[in-house]
Image (cartoon, rainbow, N blue to C red):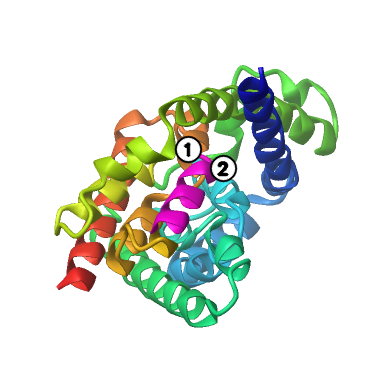
Amino acid sequence: MNLFSDVLLDTILDSVRMLPFLFAAFLLMEALEHCSASWINNMLTSLKKSGPAAGALLGCVPQCGFSVMAANLYSGGVISVGTLLAVFLSTSDEAIIILMGHPGNAGAIGRLLAVKVLIALAAGFLADLIFARRFSYAKHIEDLCRNCGCHSRRGIVRPALNHTFRLFAYIFVCSGILNLLIALAGTDAISAFLLNGSLLQPFLTAVIGFIPNCAASVLLTELYLSGTLSFASVIAGLCTNAGMGLIVLFRVNKNLRENLAVAGLLYLTAVISGVILSI
């Protein structure tokens, strides 16, 4: 019973932390939908040019709220795929907080943030440069509201709340299932799986990073601090660790092939970065 109560508590805390970010993202999209089309087009054009730089910096903020927000904004056509990728890559969820809790890790925090920002900047701008034609930017914010009936009401607050709590319920269920699986498997079994000292380690940690809640970043950071993971491997794992961002992307963006491509680019970038750092 203690295991289940701990899992439930962790799930509640993980999910509730995202509520402000979810609401802010949906409120912004509702506001944009009610603005003039010309103003929106001008804003989207400017964001596509400098979006990856802003995304890389915003993703550094602890917790995965900005990755959740970015997934929503991308699905509504507000930001480009490069900006989305930059946010996902620079997000570290709980890693920074855990490192701050261990005295003497200021250098590790600085190195981790600097490397992840550089990776996010390079991958974000390259994605916009190379894959601009492969990813459809012809998205419309109102597409997120199709068939939900939220715009039968006036204003922007109630529709934003409606979307927020629908998505919150989805996140809560997914997070609870994942927390339970991790608790049942145990960290020792996961540590043994990670082939300490092998060049293959970044490939495995990048897979672990896809676990879409703070459990993955906590696990990866603790293993790094214990010496089980190299710096290159923890970077690879934390690059794919976009928190709930990917789950939200698959939930709200209806183009499955596009979502899988984003996940593939995320994994490829993380592995290449980890291997280069290992060498």
Give yes or no for residue 218 being in the magenta stretch. yes
User: Quarter of the image containing the N terminus?
Assistant: top right
In this view, 56 is above or below 178: below
Q: Residue at x 61, y 34 (%)?
A: 142
The residue lying toward the viewer, choosing from 237 and 35, is 237
Q: Quadrant of residue 270?
A: bottom left
Magenta part of the chain: 213-223
Q: Which residue is mark 2?
A: 72
Residue farthest to the bottom, as pictured: 107
In this view, 232 is above or below 4: below
In this view, 267 is above or below 99: above
Residue 163 lies, in percent from the top left, at 69, 29
Looking at the rendered structure, the kind of residue marked 2 is Asn
Q: Is residue 125 left or right of residue 35?
A: left
Mark 2 or 1, nearer chain start: 2
Residue 130 visible here: yes
Looking at the rendered structure, the kind of residue marked 1 is Leu
Give yes or no for residue 168 being in the magenta stretch. no
Badge 2: few (under 14), some or many (20 or more) residues near its Cα, within 10 Å? many
Q: Which residue is mark 1?
A: 249
Q: Residue at x 60, y 75 (%)?
A: 103
The residue lying toward the viewer, choosing from 238 and 108, is 108
Secondary structure found at label 1: helix
Badge 1: few (under 14), some or many (20 or more) residues near its Cα, within 10 Å? many
Residue 242 visible here: no
